[in-house]
Image (tube, rainbow, N blue to C red):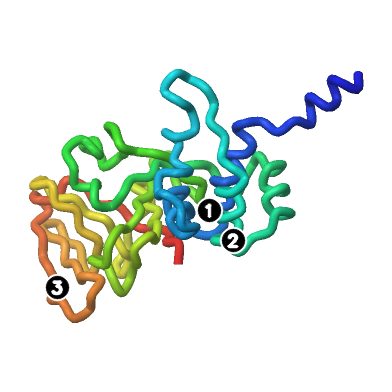
Amino acid sequence: MVTQAKAQRMLTHDQIWGALDRLAARAGLSPSGLAKRAGLDPTTFNKSKRVTSDGRERWPSTESIAKALAAAESSIDLFARLIDDDSGDGRTVPLLGFAHASATGAFDESGFPAGKGWTEIALPTAEDQHTFALEISGDTLRPAYRDGDVILVSPETPIRKGDRVLLKTKAGDVTVATLKRRTAKALELQPLDAAQAERTIAVGEVAWIARIVWASQ
């Protein structure tokens, strides 16, 4: 009985990695964003690194966990609570680097995640079953979004005037902007940099458009 009780209290591989995912989400980061902020290789906490090529479980080192806690300004006590909190702060959603969002095959014709390159991230909210996240890289979306920010995109949430949206054209271009006006023939968009001129896109040129419902700022 004692041996069984001890076994039940042993930490599992999934518990430790799940706690790291929730730690990243609490800090408003993806797992790779947390690793980067902690001064580690950005792929340290990626799901692809959690199992070796021959199927063996790979555990995070105590040093990497300590650095992650420092980067997230969290304590070991909080990490222990995150281990026990299987429900987390919300369900996981697909995550892709923004720079790869325009790649062929990254989305299906409805604007839902598809193909390779997607990982997962735990986020505070998920508006619909097709919600996905994009991790911003570089400064092209400043001042609204910074390098390392994560935006949550909901394809099924209604879009209203003034909402920030993610739009993909049939030519393959991906744009983040504020929806100024929408008619039966065209969409009028305001770039995130207010100094830039408004842009009008014919409805026939739009592959899909989805609302940005959350950002890790």
Observer-nearest residue: 136 or 132?
Answer: 136
**Residue at position x 49%, y 33% from top?**
50
Point out which mark residue 70 bears.
2
Question: Mark 3, mark 2: which one is toward the viewer?
Answer: 2
SS at badge 1: helix
Residue 201 appears in the figure:
yes
Mark 3 or mark 2: name the one nearer the start of the chain.
2
Residue 24 in the image: x percent, y percent?
Answer: 53, 53
Position of 80 relative to 201 (above/below): above
Mark 3 or mark 1: name the one nearer the start of the chain.
1
Mark 2 neighbour class, 10 Å CA radius: few under 14, some 14 to 19, many 20 or more:
some
Q: Quadrant of residue 141?
A: bottom left
Residue 10 in the image: x percent, y percent?
Answer: 75, 30
Give the residue type at disc 3. Answer: Glu
**Residue at position x 43%, y 59% from top?**
214
Q: Do the residues labelled 2 and 1 touch (CB within 8 Å)?
A: no
**Residue at position x 60%, y 56% from top?**
69
What is the C-alpha distance between the residues marked 3 and 2?
A: 42 Å
Residue 124 appears in the figure:
no
Q: Quadrant of the C terminus?
A: bottom left
Give the residue type at disc 1. Answer: Ala
Mark 3 neighbour class, 10 Å CA radius: few under 14, some 14 to 19, many 20 or more:
some
Mark 1 neighbour class, 10 Å CA radius: few under 14, some 14 to 19, many 20 or more:
many
Which residue is labeled 3 in the image? 198
